[in-house]
Image (cartoon, rainbow, N blue to C red):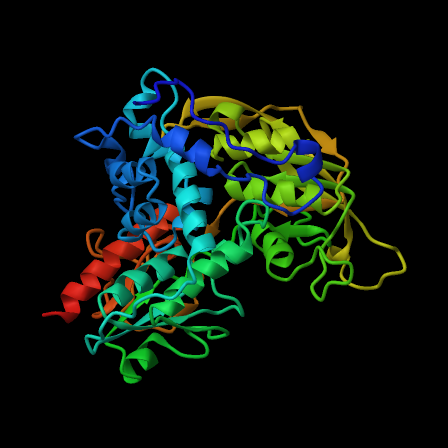
Amino acid sequence: MPNMSPKKNAMPSQAPEVRAHNFDEVALGYDEATALDEAARCLNCKNMPCVTGCPVNIHIPEFISKIKECDFEGAYQVINRSSSLPAVCGRVCPQETQCEAKCVRGIKGEPVGIGRLERFVADWHNAHTDGVADIPETNGHKVAVVGSGPSGLTCAGDLAKKGYSVTVYEALHTAGGVLVYGIPEFRLPKAIVKKEVDNLKAMGVTIETNVVIGKTLTVDELFEMGFEAVFIGSGAGLPSFMNIPGESLKGVYSANEYLTRSNLMKAYLDNPVTPISKGGRVAVVGGGNVAMDAARTALRLGAEKVYIVYRRSMEELPARREEVEHAIEEGVEFMLLGSPVEILGYRNPDDKRDPKNGTVIGMKCIKMELGEPDERGRRSPIPVEGSEFTLDVDTVVMSIGTSPNPLIKSTTEGLETNKRGGIIVEESTGATTKMGVYAGGDAVTGAATVISAMGAGKVAAKAIDEYLSK
């Protein structure tokens, strides 16, 4: 019998006052009984509207039906046909604006907890299998993938399933891209990412770390090494700044640097090799998911006060509602309708170095009001004259966006980019302006979601297969 409860089963989680002081995963996941109860809310609609909202086209009613039958491994195999990273997607994919937004149960109540069920299935599989996979029979073709983030791993996985010999080149010392350097442990445990990467390795995918394409090797050299196609999924790791006075002061970070130092370089340890500012009062400028991650990380690093400074209102805040709610519960204070105009600093008068090397002692801001909507339909913020105020902070984290690193473009002849630095591609295939080279994810779009990057990796994998099968 269907479960006609209008509300989805709540996700068990750590108490806010506890989790704000540790890096353990906040959400604890469904147990089998809860997963079965939630799966019973699915009506198994014939027209499957939820599937149309999924960027990687997971057959959602089919995997949920398998859960209802207690065939959890069967449910995983359904998901695995479309997604190479189910345990990741179940945690960080914004289902509320995608598959769950299309769920008919959401018309008169809450949609089915599709993401929570996907996480349950993936975690069950990882806990009950040895990770040994069947390596597909080789088809004799070689493909190189640049970047081991969500788009690169997805492209590699889809091609490996078709028998391609795939080598993934990662610039950092650990595979996973933004999944390991950008998303904190409390949202996405690194052991989960490692397990997903190990699953790909078990399928025959080779991963080479500490290789910077454009520096260690060029794209053209990859072709000379015998690769017949190249997929670029190098992400968008070049941070943006506001170009206001004081941004070069000690204690000012980009969110990329701040999170990478914490997530990948383990700056939370007592004697880290790569240190980071801990404690004190922290201002995070921006309102996206990355800003929430930075603010919540600051709390866990011992900050006594953390502010989110955002120039629009709560209604325009682009971060996921769940992440905003978690931040508020944990004690982050939101300074809305405000924007920095200067970062204030102090320099010891005995210090003869450049005065720009001073230390943050505060941030001068101005209040904003919302005017007419911009070209994207968002109301434009307008400074309110005479409304300046100062925040007493000693660390500032800028989280106002990123763009693709220009290194690959500058070392690859025939690869065209747009004015924002994104690689120009044919939308339906991911093909770039250079023959045999495909691209997807943040390297094309700029900073976006994990699942959209995965969708781009799938599109490119299909196109590469068609290109090399001619």
Spot the residue most to the right. 350
Residue at 47 percent across and 53 percent down: it is 127
Asked if one can make out residue 333 in the rendered structure from this viewpoint, the answer is no
| Viewer-proximal residue among 35 and 45 | 35
User: Split into 4 quadrants, where in the image is the N terminus?
Assistant: top left
Locate residue 154, reporting x and y percent.
33, 58
Locate residue 37, reporting x and y percent.
40, 28
User: Split into 4 quadrants, where in the image is the C terminus?
Assistant: bottom left
| Viewer-proximal residue among 243 and 44 | 44
Spot the residue most to the left. 470
Res 43 quadrant in image = top left
| Viewer-proximal residue among 346 and 56 | 56
From what the image shows, is residue 36 above or below residue 460? above
Locate residue 92, reporting x and y percent.
46, 43
From what the image shows, is residue 404 above or below residue 186? below
Residue at 43 percent across and 43 percent down: it is 119
Spot the residue most to the top. 108
Residue at 41 percent across and 48 percent down: it is 122
Asked if one can make out residue 370 in the rendered structure from this viewpoint, the answer is yes
Locate residue 86, reporting x and y percent.
38, 49
Res 460 quadrant in image = bottom left
